[in-house]
Image (spheres, rainbow, N blue to C red):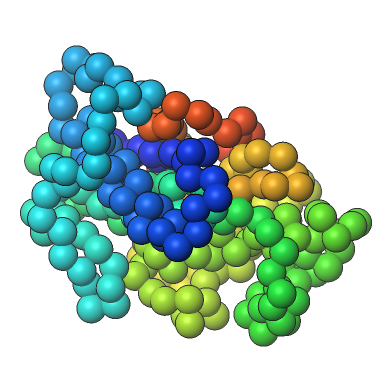
Amino acid sequence: MVFYLGLSYMSNYTGIRGDLHRLQTNEGRRILALLDRKAGASGENRAGEHDGAGFQGPAGIGDIAREDGGRPFFTDGRADFNISHSGRVAAVAYVRKEEGASRFFRTGCDVQQAGVRGNRDAIIRRFYHDEERRYVEAAPDPLERNLRFFRLWVLKEAYLKMKGFSVGDIAKTPAFFPDGETPCFRAGEDAKTCALNFYLSEWGAPSDAYMLAVCLEGNNACPGPPEVIWLSRERLSGGPWLPVLRAAD
């Protein structure tokens, strides 16, 4: 199985307002095209593939359609992907099945710049599980409270996007709760039929952090976190992956 996470830090987009969403979308498509080329290429490395040099736009992605809920997918079934962007970061989770495999695994990702949300506390009260609310509310200061909120939010969003659900289905997400310093996954609605692997990381300074979560549908043998590939000249200084453990059934 090929499992990539492509990232781009669009520092040159600072100050752009009206076209920011279009630029974010195009950057996500560009990353997807590069990951797809890399996954399908021979063992030879393509020049500039890791630093973003020499690439112009999102050409060559192939045929993409959408599920009923709007989730995009490759029509030939060769791989699965998910795109997310926030602020100046674009992220693409990409998983490609092994040659001859009868099925491929779905993936979802979510990146969020952890700015203060005006409706944060209302979201916590309405949608977060009891353990999650206690985790957020036990934060020692407002900055840590905000970071805890977004750690949980990106994990939930990654799950929803993997499943093809909307934000309105947030009540269907599993509960995430602290196990010491490590967020721990409590098995959810489909634990008996589908093992889920979650990976969580934080990028940048705490006062201007980006939260990033990836969800991979898989089996009981956890494949490990995705290979991270930066496709921009500038990179954020990211921390290690925080393991999100599955609770025992």
Q: Reply above or below: 6 against 123.
A: above
Please state the horizontal and vertical placement of residue 31, each as a whole percent of the image: 32, 41
Image-based side of 180 in relation to 163, left or right = right
Name which quarter of the figure residue 223 lies in: top left
Identify the residue shown where x is 26% and y is 25%.
54
Q: Reply above or below: 43 against 236.
A: above
Please state the horizontal and vertical placement of residue 89, each as a whole percent of the image: 49, 46
| Quadrant of image for the C terminus | bottom right
- Disc tally is 0
Q: Residue furthest right?
A: 140
Identify the residue shown where x is 37% and y is 52%.
23
Residue 237 visible at all: yes
| Quadrant of image for the N terminus | top left
Residue 220 visible at all: no
Q: Nearer the viewer, residue 28 or 167?
A: 28
Image-based side of 171 in relation to 129, left or right = left
Identify the residue shown where x is 68% and y is 59%.
115
Please state the horizontal and vertical placement of residue 235, each as a whole percent of the image: 52, 30
Image-based side of 76 in relation to 81, left or right = left
Q: Nearer the viewer, residue 178 or 211?
A: 211
Q: Nearer the viewer, residue 245 or 9?
A: 9
Please state the horizontal and vertical placement of residue 56, each as a whole percent of the image: 24, 36
Name which quarter of the figure residue 141 lies in: bottom right
Q: Nearer the viewer, residue 112 or 233?
A: 233
Identify the residue shown where x is 57% and y is 56%.
112
Image-based side of 2 in relation to 9, left or right = left
